[in-house]
Image: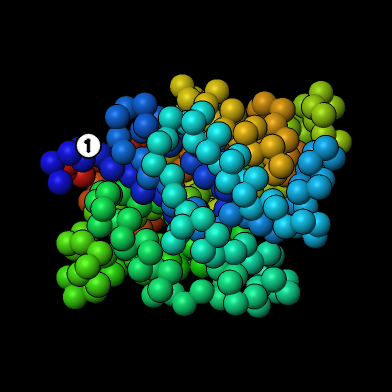
Amino acid sequence: MTDLPDRRLLLVHAHPDDESINNGATMARYAAEGARVTLVTCTLGEEGEVIPPALAHLAPDRDDVLGPHRAGELAAAMAELGVIDHRFLGGPGRYRDSGMMDAPQNRRPEAFWSADLDEAAGHLVAVVREVRPQVLVTYDPDGGYGHPDHIQAHRVAVRAAELAGDPGFRPELGGPWEIAKIYWNRMPRPVAEAAFARLGEELGGTPFTEAASVEDVPGVVDEALVTTEIDGAGFAAAKVAAMAAHRTQIEVAEPWFALSNALAQPLFTTEYYTLVRGGTTVPPVGDRSASDRETDLFQGVAP
C-alpha cells in the first residue's frame, strides 16, 4: 500500500476517554508529525458514571443513551488531538461496556468481557491489515487497574497482533502484517509520587476537595520497568482539550483533573510506556535508568 505514511501507530482502548487520559499527548504529537494514528475503542462506555448534574439524564440507569453521547465526546476529543482515524471495534455498539469487575453487567451476552476472544480479535485483525501499523499501544495484562474491559482490550490486542501475521487466518481480511513493536501504558512510581506531593500542596487552590492516591493511577510500576517516555509538553493544550471534551466523565482543572469519584489527580503530559515486543536499543530491566529510555515509539522502526 504505497499511499500509507511512513509511520503508523495503532492504539487499542476500552472506553471513550481512556485514550485521552493515557495517550492524548502522544497521539497529538504523532498526528502533528504526519504519522497515521489509528484509535480503536472497544465499547461505547455505556456504563460510565455521569459527572455534570445537567447531563444526569444520560446516566445508564435511565434511558441508556450514554453510549451514543460518549461517541460524540470521543469524536470531539479526536478533533482536538488531530486524529482522523478513530473506530469502534466491530462497529459502534458491537460490544457493550461491561461495568466494573464482578458487576452484574459483566454477564450480559453483549458485554465486551463476555466476547469470544478470536471473534473480537478478528475485527481488530481487519484494522491491522488495513493500516499496517508498525507500533501498537495498549494496556498491560491487568488492564492497568483491573477493569474487565481493559483486561479484555489487552487480550484482544495481543491476540490480534498474533493472528494478523498468520497468513492462514482469515485471508479475506487482507494480507498478513507483523507489528514491529508493542507497548503497554505505564507510569513510573517516582513520577506519580512527585506529582501527588505537589497536588497535596496545591489542593486548596483547586475546585476539588480531596485527592486521589498514587494507587488510583493505572499502570504505576517501578521506574526500571519503563522503557520509553514521550515528551508531550508541546501538546499539553491539545491533551487538556481532549480530556475536557469527555465532559460526562472528566472534570479538568489544569494541571489536575478528576473522574466521577471527584478525587483530584495529576494530568500528565509526559507519557510513559513499556516496550514488550520488538526493538533492540533498550537495556534490560536492572540495567536501565531514566536516561536510557527511548524518546520515540518508532525508534529503530523501518518505514
Judge whether residue 227 can be spotted in this image. no
- For the residue pair 151 and 39, the one nearer the viewer reads as 39
Specify the quadrant of the image occupied by residue 230. top left
Q: Where is residue 274 drawn, in percent x and y?
A: 41, 52
The residue to which callout 1 is attached is 5
**Identity of the residue furthest to the left in this view:** 2
Where disc 1 sits, the SS reads loop
Query: For the residue marked with disc 1, what is the amino acid?
Result: Pro
Residue 89 shown left or right of residue 127 in the figure:
right
Residue under the point 43% across and 30% down = 82
Q: Where is residue 263 drawn, in percent x and y?
A: 78, 43
Residue 170 shown left or right of residue 197 in the figure:
left
Residue under the point 42% across and 35% down = 83
Q: How many numbered tags mark residues here? A: 1
Judge whether residue 95 can be spotted in this image. yes
Residue under the point 76% across and 48% down = 58
Considering only vertical position in the picture, is 258 above or below 120? above
Residue 231 shown left or right of residue 297 in the figure:
right
Q: Residues within 10 Å of mark 1 (few under 14, many from 20)?
A: few
- For the residue pair 192 and 302, the one nearer the viewer reads as 302
